[in-house]
Image: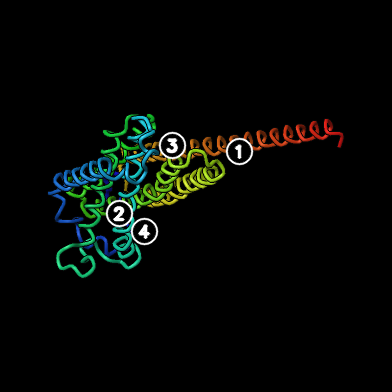
Amino acid sequence: MGVIHDPPDHKHNNSHILSANLALHSSISPLIPYSGLILTVALVIIFIFRYIFELFLLTRIYGKTYLSLNEVNRRGFINHHIAGIAKITMLVTGAYPLFLVFFEGATLHHKFGHSNTVTLGDIFIVLNHLFCAMYIFELFFRAKLSPVAIMHHIGAIVIAQSAIAVTVATEHAQDGVLDFLLCIIWGIFDVIAEFWPHVAIILYRCHPTKHEFLAKVFASACITTFAGTVIETVVVMWLFGSLWYRWTLVFKIVTPILHCVFSAAQLWGAWNFRSMWLRQRRFIEEERVKESGMDLREEGRMVAENTRSGV
């Protein structure tokens, strides 16, 4: 998302999508000056979790399943756990603040829970940096990533960080808050759409020979990823289009392009899961043919024995 400018014609003022309460404060959170520190702490926490998880827990939980993986698959296996846990954390932590802001008309300076100091904006800032840290870790840790996934992760990081910077780097700080919240909406869809694929790959590594089970897992991953991408595109582009008159020319061009990259990465994932689903179906058919052949051979052997015995 980008810098938003006031409309030249005030007749469009009634087209604001979010509650007017969002404009009461021109900043997201007093934690913005500490963004670098928050991002660093998030990366350190992810590293510590990865270190403990890999060194002490993986072999105890998965045993030979983990030890039999090559280095590339091990790194992917670990990352799927970390990304899945990070996304659960973001969803659980952000659900309540999101509900208050978008459905209860709360401002970003509204207190979180029973806290006297922590605000909803503080929570969103921390989750934003956790979101970025998750993708930064994956870019450095994974041994193999597709070009589409690389572009998706880099774009997500840049957009998420820019959404914070625009609230303090321009004189249109109030509109910058709206820009930030639109990015939060996009991030939510991104987290939800890509959660089940992490689980699917973990199950695939744990049960590589359970073809009927994996066929169902990959089919559901394909459907949920595709459906999530479609819904995300409709909602985000509707919000973006509703505020079309407020965007500068640069961001009218850049934002749809970036969203196409994000959508392409998710659709690429859906296509891969479709291929994996069809592959499992082929394995199932091959097993059925093999079992049928064994039954025929067994029947032929019994007929031959009966013939020799004169039955």
Q: Residues within 10 Å of mark 2 (few under 14, many from 20)?
A: few
The residue indicated by pointer 4 is 17
- Say above or below: 260 vs 163: above
Q: Quadrant of the N terminus?
A: top left
Marks 2/3: CA–CA distance: 26 Å
N-terminal-most mark, 2 or 1: 2
Report which quarter residue 132 is drawn in: top left
Assess whether mark 3 and mark 2 are in contact (beta carbons under 8 angstroms): no
Q: Give SS at disc 1.
A: helix
Label 4: element kind: loop
Which mark lies nearer to you, 4 or 2? Answer: 2
Q: Which residue is mark 3?
A: 264
Residue 236 locus on image (x, y percent): 40, 49
- Please tell me which residue lies in front, 214 or 264: 214
| Gap in angstroms between the C-alphas marked 2 and 1 | 36 Å
**Measured from the top left, where is residue 21 in percent x and y?**
27, 64
**Secondary structure at numbered mark 2:** helix
Q: Which residue is mark 1?
A: 284
**Is label 2 or label 1 in front?**
1
Q: Nearer the viewer, mark 3 or mark 1?
A: 1
Q: Please, is residue 276 above or below residue 86 in the view? A: above
Mark 2 — residue? 89
Q: Disc 3 or 1, which lies upstream in sequence?
A: 3
Identity, as a three-letter code, of the amino acid under mark 4: Ile
Which quadrant holds the C terminus? top right
